[in-house]
Image: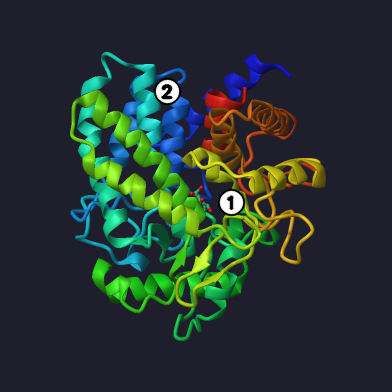
Amino acid sequence: MDVTALDQQARKILRGNDRGGYTVPTDGLYPYQWNWDSAFAAWGFAQFDVERAWAELETLVSGQWSNGMIPHILFHKPDPGYFPGPDVWGTEGKGPVLSSGITQPPVAATFALATHEADPEAGLPRLRALYPKLRDWHRWFMTWRCEDGMIFVTHPWEAGRDNCPDWDTAMAAIDPVGVGEYTRRDTSHVDPAMRPTKEDYDRYIWLVQRGKRLGWDDAAMADDMPFKVADPTMTFILLRACRDLGRMADLLGEDRAEIDGWIDRLTEGAGRLRNGKGVFDAINLNTGAHSGHLSCASYLCWYAGIESEDMLACLDKAFEDTPYTIPSHAFGTEEFNPKRYWRGPIWGILNTLTGIGLAEMGHEDRAARLRRATADLIAEHGFAEYFDPLTGEPAGGGTFTWTAAIWLAWAS
Ligand code: 9YW
């Protein structure tokens, strides 16, 4: 493996996807600033251009709504190559930048802290300016997206795991009546077999139309929500991000009592996501039923500081089951599909968060194994959006920002 050449390629991808203060996930398929992609980009930039890393995070929080929410997409400049654009979301006037009406997994506080670690002295004022914005975002989650300590999502896009089987029952209960005609753009950039189906997409758009009709009002959205699923991705990531926000408060001499309260509530809530088999999964809050699915999000427990022997056993089995790990949905199940987005393929970012958690909780061997496996995938198959767990083949978009970022910050 030629690490130097790969480092150079990764830097070139970040630079190439830079649109001036923000980075697109990849050219063509995703032409705007996506929330968690951007936070990963900052972490990647922090390895070689810390000034650019701060700028990425600052541009991200510049889209914050007055209720504290930081949207999942910021539409800085028009791009007809993407659907659904700002007109479909209908959020005009809600925030300082045209945006979607939902959020995404809050990894930003964690990577803001990592950026500060790369720039401890000069970076302190930058961290101080970001802190209240990140705190307000976390407070928004705890106010509007938290039930019994679990963070729920109101749209599959909010969790960042669009078509994962965790949503199947909640999605099946939606009748996308009146969604109308629309033209997808994703399938003109990428093989449709690697993307969500038309049935999924109708429901994605129907949920966006519903949010628009409700004016994206938090209380109205929470009332009689047709898609309301407590999610391990969000719950574990917010729990971890609150621990990092607490560290930030300590560094800045801010009071952290409110944050500690959030950590307690989320720790309790995370425990509720454990199903009868000891696996952390999603709960459809409209029915109370666990999904029963083992997904890549199940393994984020260690990242959130939660130990689990059952999950260690699942991980050891995952290492044995497929040549490449961790599939986004468990191998050998009816829903597993090695190519279709979040129904089987490996996502390097999820491996990264899991690897960080494993190492922190004393499982260094497994963390090293996961890291090596992820590095091999990238070295052999390129900086793809995701990878087939059976063959390692690259899938989805190419020259992907977050894959380059995790290479630089973690895998290499
Ligand atoms: C969407 C950009 C995004 C990622 C998500 C991934 C996909 C589509 O692409 O979502 O509109 O949100 O599922 O995790 O942030 O890379």
Residue 324 numbered tag: none
The image quadrant of residue 407 is top right
Sequence-first tag of 2 and 1: 2
As helix, strand or loop, the secondary structure at mark 2 comes to loop
Q: Amino acid at mark 1?
A: Ser
Q: Nearer the viewer, residue 136 or 94?
A: 136
Residue pictured at 47% horizontal, 47% vertical: 236
Residue 279 can be seen in this image = yes
Q: Is residue 304 above or below residue 142?
A: above
Q: Is residue 312 left or right of residue 91?
A: right
Estimate the x, y position of residue 6 in percent, counting from the top left.
Answer: 64, 22
Residue pictured at 45% horizontal, 71% vertical: 285
Q: Is residue 26 above or below residue 268?
A: above
Q: Nearer the viewer, residue 46 or 93?
A: 46
Quick one: quadrant of the N terminus? top right
Residue 217 can be seen in this image = no
Q: Nearer the viewer, residue 150 or 85?
A: 150
Q: Which residue is mark 2?
A: 46
Q: Which residue is mark 1?
A: 298
The image quadrant of residue 194 is bottom right
Q: Amino acid at mark 2?
A: Ala
